[in-house]
Image (tube, rainbow, N blue to C red):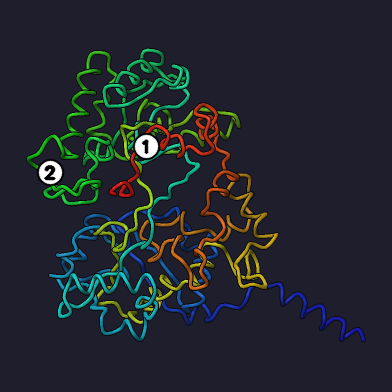
Amino acid sequence: MKRALVLALLLAVSMMLPPPRAASAEERIVLTIGDINDRSSYRVEGENQLGLWRYLEDLLGVEIQYVFLSSEEYASGLSNGNLPDIVATNNNLSTIRENGVALNLEPYLEEYVPNFLQGQAGKTYSVFRQLQGEEEGFYFFPARIGYNGVGFSNGPTRPGSFIVRWDYYRELGYPPINNEDDYLSVLLQMYENHPFTEEGDPTYLFGANNMRGYATAFRSEVSVDYWAAYQYQNNIFTNEIYDGYTDPAHSMWWTSMSWYNKLYRAGKESGSFDLEVFTDTSTQFYAKRTRGQYLGMYSNDSSLYKQHLASDRDTLTGYAAVPSAGTNQYTNVYQLLGNGSAYMWFISANSPHQEAALRLFNYMCDPDFLREAFMGRRGVTWDYNADGVPQMTEYGQEQLDAYEAGSAGEDNYYAQWGNFDSLPNNWPILRDNVVHPDGYMLDFATISRGHEVAAMTNNLSLDICAHYDVELPSAAFYEAGVLEFRNDCG
């Protein structure tokens, strides 16, 4: 009797433990993934490895190792073919092809990557084949097919908007900003009131470490496709083509240079133009941004807000975008070819582990695996109800709510499991808003207006909603008359 009881207890305990790894560490090959951006904070490997990566390793029977490639190492690898098994790239596609360092994937897709030939990924593959021609082969997997941006958001910032230090802007009484001159006027008023931060650091009118045109590409009077080539830039609403080198009125680069020149002339006497912007490293620029030294910003950032939130739960210190018709709304953009024409993955032609690399990409466009990557394991955080509708379990909803509210501890399921929103832009092949064969989005729980409203805890967002009397910050933009990216083409 006692022996039976012991066996029953051992069986019960064993059912609570995670499943054994598919192969011992000694038996596993090491599959290397090379990235030209430093991803050391994404917990792909090591003691703090996220659960979703461990799950993927177990499915593949490999050990995944992320490798950061410096510019020199990347250039050298493209020349001599000495590259990791899998490589991320956002440029040099022609060089990669010409040097023969990428595996021709075409002969292996049907056997090893069948998911890439089906559903949304299959449509993308078909378009690539039509554009490239059947005889050219197929060398690159695209990144994140699906909709980029949604028309409802509880976040306080927007790409390319008139972004300000919200606490200083609020002091001014929320003055309207309808164009670049209004923006500069507000920044100058903020500088007059706050030439130094509360910590004693000098402030500057505007911060940017991107001189390629991001600051103005999304202005309503410019509205060009930021990710297009400089020589041929198209207006995102009319599709008119401009020469980005010779048309200063429509070029995002020339309009950006004009803006920086205006800032320089306005701030050179007072010192409010940051001359070090041309020599600062990225680390130095980010440090100034996190200290709140920039009164205006060229892009979204939450580091200043998060830093102050840690010591003041009611803080309004941070960067937010002013609702304005002077900018456009980057939402609901269906990226059939992925996240920009040059954000791609390729498998090294010299990789000794090509089969494992191919199988990894099959999971990167497998709706079932990606559902679990985004939402957690089926049967733990979510499952299907009797009608075949995916829904969160009570435990999963509790863990998700705490994680999104920022109140989760280290033992929170999603803090341990992770999600692809916190991983490199190139992962995975399909976005979380792609529809699963069951008829629901891969992320069926968080992509909705109701969820955005319920999950809105950001103080800046709440202040925007209170001032403009709207349900979500994005609604304030629409009410201001902003045009939605590509959705107002008629």
| Residue 381 image label | none
Crowding at mark 1 (Cα within 10 Å: few <14, some 14-19, many 20+) = some
> Which of 82/207 is in front?
207
The quadrant the N terminus occupies is: bottom right
Please provide percent x and percent y for residue 399: 65, 55
Q: Amino acid at mark 2?
A: Gly
Please give the residue where the numbered disc 2 appears in the rendered image.
Answer: 244
Q: Count the numbered circles shown.
A: 2
The kind of secondary structure element at disc 1 is helix
Q: Amino acid at mark 1?
A: Tyr
Between disc 2 and disc 1, the foreground one is 2
Locate residue 208: give its quadrant.
top left
Q: Image check: 272 left or right of 410?
A: left
Please give the residue where the numbered disc 1 appears in the rendered image.
Answer: 286
Please provide percent x and percent y for residue 346: 28, 70
- Nearer-N-terminus badge (2/1): 2
Q: Residue at x 87, y 82 (%)?
A: 5
Crowding at mark 2 (Cα within 10 Å: few <14, some 14-19, many 20+) = many
Q: Residue at x 58, y 55 (%)?
A: 415
> Which of 287/26 is in front?
287
Locate residue 212: give its quadrant.
top left
Q: Image check: 20 left or right of 358?
A: right
Q: Residue furthest right?
A: 1
> Which of 140/74 is in front?
140
Please provide percent x and percent y for residue 3: 87, 86
The kind of secondary structure element at disc 2 is loop
